[in-house]
Image (cartoon, rainbow, N blue to C red):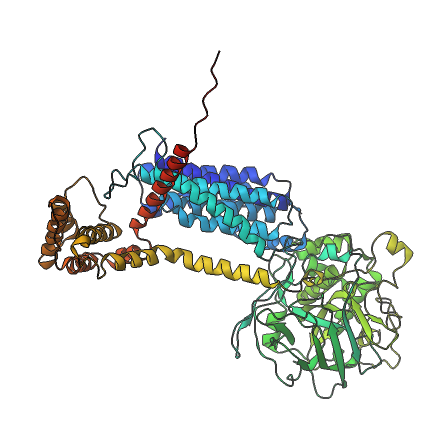
Amino acid sequence: MSGRARLALCAAAATLMTSCALLPLVSPATWYFQAVFLVLVQTGVGAVTRRVPLARTLTLACQALVTLLLLTLFCARSYAVAGFVPGPQAFRYFAELLDSGSDQVAQYAIPAPLTPGIRLMLVGGVALIGLAVDALAVTFRSAAPAGLPLLALYSVAAGLADGGAAWLWFLLASAGYLMLLLAEGRDRLSQWGRVFGGSGGAQARGDGGTTAPVRTGRRIGALALGVAVVVPLALPTLDGGLLDAAGAGVGQGTGGGTISAVNPLVSLRDSLNTDDDRQVLSYRTSTEDTQDMYLRIVALDDFDGTTWRPAQRHIEDVPGTFPDPAGLARDVRRDEIRTRIAAADTYAQDWLPMPYPASGVDVDGKWRYEPVGRTLVGDHGQTTKGARYTVRSLVVQPTARRLATAPAPPAELEREFTKVPASLPDVVAEKAAEVTKGAHNHYEQAVKLQDWFALNGGFTYDTQVEVGSGSGAIARFLRDKRGFCVHFSFAMASMARTLGIPARVAVGFTPGTAQADGSMSVGLRDAHAWPELYFEGVGWTRFEPTPNRGTTPEYTRTRTPAGEESKAPEATESASATASTEPSADESCSPDQKRLQACPAESALAGAASHDDGPPWWQIAGLAALVLLVLVVPLLPMLWRQRRRAARLGGHGRGEHETAGHALAVWQEVMDSAWDLGIVPDDSLTPRRTAERIVRLGGLGGGAAEAMHRLASAVEAVLYAPRPRPVAGVARDARVVLGALRAAVGGGARLRAAVAPRSVRRVMWAVAERWAGLRAAVRARVPSVPRRAQG
């Protein structure tokens, strides 16, 4: 087997060994066999195309094409031409699978089920990493950088895993990478031949043992493996579900930035059934009526047919007074209240819970304001952990008449918040039209939707139902009629959009439980999701479609015609009428609900809660040391060569006793610098022939060629004269030669010579020689044990 074929197999093996770290994350692990087949096929394609031979870019393109065809065959066969040729439908299906897979990763605890979306992410991700490793290590002959995609693959697995046999996966990944480096070293070594310097480092030992660079590589690999085992002990770890925390990407500076589209509904189903209903917030408010005191965290306004998530928005500094809420007319009754909120030290997440709509916030820390959702998000790691803050907010009290006679919303707002993707099943719009039949306006349609979900639609509140994803998740919920607040809010908001009503989903907490001292306590089980619908003149308005959760808004408790005002609103059965006096969802849970574990125990943001008090100082120091190591290690060859060059060409060698050492050191520097620039030294030539070779290969002429020949004469005098005498200008001639060699090559070659000098290999050879000498000395001093006579 050729050296390159061996290297290709080692690259494939390294990828597959590293991908084993993903095995504990998903069950069953049948996806791994598809990944193995795909990586081996793309390795074979690379080997064939390199033997043709094709250009490097064409080799990479052939491998990528075959990988795409196989992925289509495995994951999108029914959408492809002839079952494996991808077309527009196949690419759209791939996009849907990736979207659903990313959502499913956020929903399931380890091990997650092997859904089509997760399978595509795993098999496609391993194939992509395998392609990158093969391209770097084999096609472009640079195995060391191939460790970066392997590290990325292992880091994802290690960050999501929950311990267990993590050490085994680390050893497999490390062994794969070291095997790849060793294979590349052997392949390169077979092409070196004899290298100038007489160290013997590049030659095989006479006794048939391994070469010095190979032995050194093994020892360096063992040392690196040991360091890699120790360093992670000083780093923070990730634990929990597949994605057990929600974050926000925040721009820097004081005048702008964006907030990324990150879904805060993470590890939801597991949190719904938690027995640990610890307090996350407590508050005191200036109003006595707390039944509508929903503490809103974030608005999910980007709907892709699969799920709802916060859209990417512009953020800015927190204003002293917030602007008036969008769409709220001045003649609508409103009262301003003040609420003092305290977050528990164990509750740390990026969004700041506040009553909606807030008109001002007094809070310490690095917070930014997102004006569309009227939310505050932490900047540069700022979280709610232990936060104490005061919120001024409005209690908006619209009437049913005002909502029923609301004019059309602004065109831009209506266009953005009524968008429905083509992938949404038709049954959603059909059911919305059926339920709201006979309604005269958007308000009546919204109330009919709310009452259908909460009262007369036959729906059951059940926290054991999977969150669900994909374009058919809402359709399945409408068919099965079982779910919790996420299902109800997502479905109502989606159906409202099909009717032309601007809609979004809000996430936060219900009012909580009244305490004896007059404060309110909010626990994990009080977390909730609800739809917000927009009515011009009132703005974004809360509805409550989830049975047995929260309170039904007063402005929806009426069945009077749109043209009449209800003086005594009739409460519907869509929510508990006693929620204001007994807001605790747990207390309102019936015995049957407790038996079925269907109590309202949801915690939509429990995944964002954390017991982490921040990494201790020793972890921070370890992380800083690792960052320093990553920054400094790549520069070590350049720093060593600069120091070495300065020492060789420095102002020594003035006396006769230093003549020989000085001349040979200068000559060695010229040889090493020429090697760094691409002229491999040949120690089989005399100094004079070596000078002629460098003049020819380096394109030297004039004074540079003369300086090179003078250096050769000085070295010959040192080597052959009975008593060497000092030669003036040796270092000066060397600088002339080096300047001419650098001028004769391109900028890329000069950069390579400076950053990754080839002559650094002499360090490995020197270390190997010293180690061999040390071992020989130890063996010479330790008496050998005579062999026992064999009878």
Q: Is residue 79 above or below residue 460?
A: above
Q: Is residue 217 above or below residue 416?
A: above
Q: Is residue 434 above or below residue 757?
A: below
Q: Residue furthest top?
A: 791
x then y, percent, for residue 258: 54, 71
Residue 336: name its quadrant.
bottom right
For the point 23% across and 43% down, which residue is it? 196
Residue in front for this viewpoint, 11 or 265: 11
Instruction: Please indicate whether residue 423 sits to the left or right of residue 399 in the image.
Output: left
Instruction: Please indicate whether residue 586 sits to the left or right of residue 120 in the image.
Output: right
Q: Is residue 392 visible?
A: yes
Q: Is residue 46 visible?
A: no
x then y, percent, for residue 338: 75, 83
x then y, percent, for residue 412: 58, 75
For the point 41% across and 56% down, which residue is it? 633
Residue in front for this viewpoint, 11 or 206: 206
The N terminus sits in image quarter: top left
Q: Residue furthest right?
A: 591
Residue 574: name its quadrant.
bottom right
Residue 722: name its quadrant.
top left
For the point 71% across and 57% down, which residue is it? 268
x then y, percent, for residue 535: 70, 77
Instruction: Please indicate whether residue 140 sits to the left or right of residue 384 in the image.
Output: left
